[in-house]
Image (spheres, rainbow, N blue to C red):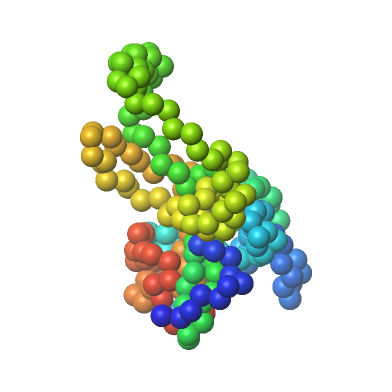
Amino acid sequence: MADTPDNLPPIGQFPAIPVAVDTEHGPTMAQFGYTKDDKKQVLVYFELLAGSHAGTRLPWFGWFGKDSWERTLESLRIAGWKSNNIADCAKELDQEVNVTVGHNSYDGKTYARVDWVNKPGGGTIQLQKPMNANELRQFAAFVSGYAKNIPPVDGKKASMARSTHAGGAEQQPGREGATTQPMRPATPARGGFDARPNPGDNRGGGFDAPSGAGDGFGGTEDRGRQPGGDDDIPF
């Protein structure tokens, strides 16, 4: 396993914006092309807005295979694509998003890239069956009888803890070192609680479609495939 350079943005979630890059055809927000296996893909750069690496620009690749095209289109929508002409992404991506930064190793070196593109505030888990206001009032009244036997605990305020532990692993999304992972179907927790992924959590593909994937919308990419699964790509 390659060492992770200290100058890389940490794995975690950050607010970000899509940015234009210069190409031989002029500035563009989205580059459309092919993988080495001639599978269609799109490349968008996102600039991080928070943490000590604010201003860093990282690539995100989306695939257009059978099992990945919908997620890629959703990610482009979140980034600001409004029309139904995908070529317009070259100039229409203008919205803030929340990205999940990941690390991938290639040829002994580690690189950072965007693995997921979410709505601002996305990447969190919501309960599948939340209490309504009346249920919460009844539950609060029930718990109050027990809570009075458990004394309050004084501690450092969250605002102070964030500044003290800058770069710590237990910070919230948008802070470097955040460790929240891309959303996946959650296993019901003990005690009867259940959770589901935030519908705003969307992830595009990687750099090259897996071998055997069909062209265009005929690919066979694994929708749940983890970032960095390709050993022959430079990210």
- Which one is nearer the viewer's eye here, 215 or 90? 90
Q: Quadrant of the N terminus?
A: bottom left
* Residue at the extreme bottom: 107
Q: Residue drawn at (29%, 37%), measured in percent from left and top?
A: 194
Q: Position of residue 190 (x, y in %)?
A: 23, 39
Horizontal side, residue 90 vs residue 106: left or right: right
Work out whether 35 lies above or below 59: below
Q: Position of residue 212 (x, y in %)?
A: 34, 75
Q: Residue drawn at (49%, 69%), measured in percent from left and top?
A: 103
Q: Quadrant of residue 159?
A: top right
- Which one is nearer the viewer's eye here, 9 or 69? 9
- Which one is nearer the viewer's eye here, 55 or 203? 55
Horizontal side, residue 49 vs residue 116: left or right: right
- Which one is nearer the viewer's eye here, 201 or 131? 131
Please say whether residue 100 is visible from this viewpoint: no
Please say whether residue 170 is visible from this viewpoint: yes
Work out whether 103 lies above or below 123: below
Q: Position of residue 222 (x, y in %)?
A: 34, 63
Q: Position of residue 218 (x, y in %)?
A: 38, 65
Work out whether 228 lies above or below 44: below
Q: Residue drawn at (58%, 73%), measured in percent from left and top?
A: 6
Tell me how many marks there are. Answer: 0
Horizontal side, residue 24 vs residue 70: left or right: right
